[in-house]
Image (cartoon, rainbow, N blue to C red):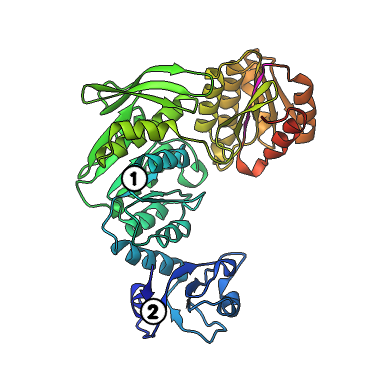
Amino acid sequence: MRLTLEETAKAVGSTDIFDGEITSVCRDTRDVSPGSLFICLEGDRFDGHAFARRAQECGAAAILAHKKVDADIPVIMCENTRRGILDLAAYVRSLKKIPVVALTGSVGKTTTKEMITLVMSEKYNTLSTIGNLNNEIGLPLTIFRMDEDTEAAVLEMGMNHFGEISNMSKCARPTMAVITNIGVSHMENLGSRAGILQAKTEILHGMEKGSCVIINGDDEYLSNADLRGFRPVTYAIENPCADFIARHITPEEAGTGFDILHDGRDYSIYLPAIGLHNIYNALAAFAVGWLNGVEPEKMKEALGGYVPSGMRQRVVSAGDITVIEDCYNASPDSIRAALSALSALQCHGKRIAVLGDMLELGEASEQLHRSCGLTAAKSADLVLCCGDMAKHYLTDAVSSGYDNIKYFASKQELLGYLLDSIESGDSVLFKASRAMKFEDLLDGVYAVHKKS
């Protein structure tokens, strides 16, 4: 990417005139290289304006700021750099006439993004969101990675508050959108599932009327969403009227076989992942690929090569036990999905669920932990819990007569009990919000049961 400083300034609303050009954009001095535009972002606990001189020393060609900085290179001033980074990304996006798939949802965004990227890459040189760069800062940084060879983009959009996805959609101007589901994540800020639906459908705000919106046809909120002016395309397992339907589902040792029915024809898929929620993710990816002209056989190959990233429901063999690493995040919907995956896993011993706190659930937090605890006690042979809110997992389960669920005040106590309980052939699920750092428990288990 190369932009003149003049067009960069114009994109962020500045009338300043400078000579020169930029070849990259960054917000961290560690990422500055010769030709970079360094954006001085300001937050509650940091201020990038204080690092302008350091950015210059690292080779930055220019600075984007909203207050005075110490620098002897061109400084482009804008009203606010958080708005400026979106405005500049919107300009960069306007230079590329390519398919842009935006996706959001309460659960499964990152996994769906990865599957869509695999499918789209069978036909296009595809850029996609890296890691969790799915907010109003991360999305522009992804767009800045577009170059002359980019033929398509897959952009994940997350949020905590109203208006965030709207800003991202207007920046990215998607040609197609995917909404995976409407759950209860971020209930603390959005008030209700109706509020969450409202926030998620902000993804339409940057799209042209008539564009496709791919939605989960089994989700009660999405099925009844007001999508007037757009073309809804549905995928489902239960809904017989959906455009793309998964059927003949066959759980296997470390994956799932199923057929996708579309337009009267079945397409056989093997997905190296477990759980119905991953079938939904694969359906969304297949629908995106179909609508963008990717050949079904190529999509089948792409989905067959899927590998879970990070600690997102990765199935690991550790000695004579099986571990499901799912410690990246947790919500009631993803807890239930993980428990369903644990139940579907071929297991020759006990099924053990190790659960930690779910965050950002607001006033509903206690009740949602209680509900998930009861589900866990019904789904697993042994449930071990740790965390400030995790004690509520026990309430409804114990009152319903289940005695297979236990609470521990610390992860170390839980780990000791778990190691004493594990036997050959057992399957163990680890599920908690990222702040719980359940990788500490994984490390403890792998120290005894070596990963293979």
Please give the residue where the numbered disc 2 appears in the rendered image.
5
Say above or below: 79 vs 435: below
Q: Locate residue 285 relative to residue 226 in the image: left or right.
A: right
Q: Residue at x 40, y 54 (%)?
A: 163
The number of numbered badges drawn on the structure is 2
Q: Residue at x 29, y 60 (%)?
A: 96
Q: Which residues are magenta?
A: 425-431
Say which quarter of the image contains residue 329. top right
Q: CA distance from mark 1 to mark 2?
A: 35 Å
Say above or below: 351 vs 336: above
Identify which residue, 333 or 129, lies in the foreground.
Answer: 129
Mark 1 element type: helix
Question: Which of pointers 1 and 2 lies earlier in the amino acid sequence?
Answer: 2
Q: Residue at x 52, y 67 (%)?
A: 27
Q: Residue at x 40, y 59 (%)?
A: 143
Nearest to the eye among marks 1 and 2: give it. 2
Please give the residue where the numbered disc 1 appears in the rendered image.
201
User: Label 2 neighbourhood size at 10 Å, few (<14), some (14-19), many (20+)?
Assistant: many
Q: Locate residue 272 relative to residue 16 in the image: left or right.
A: right
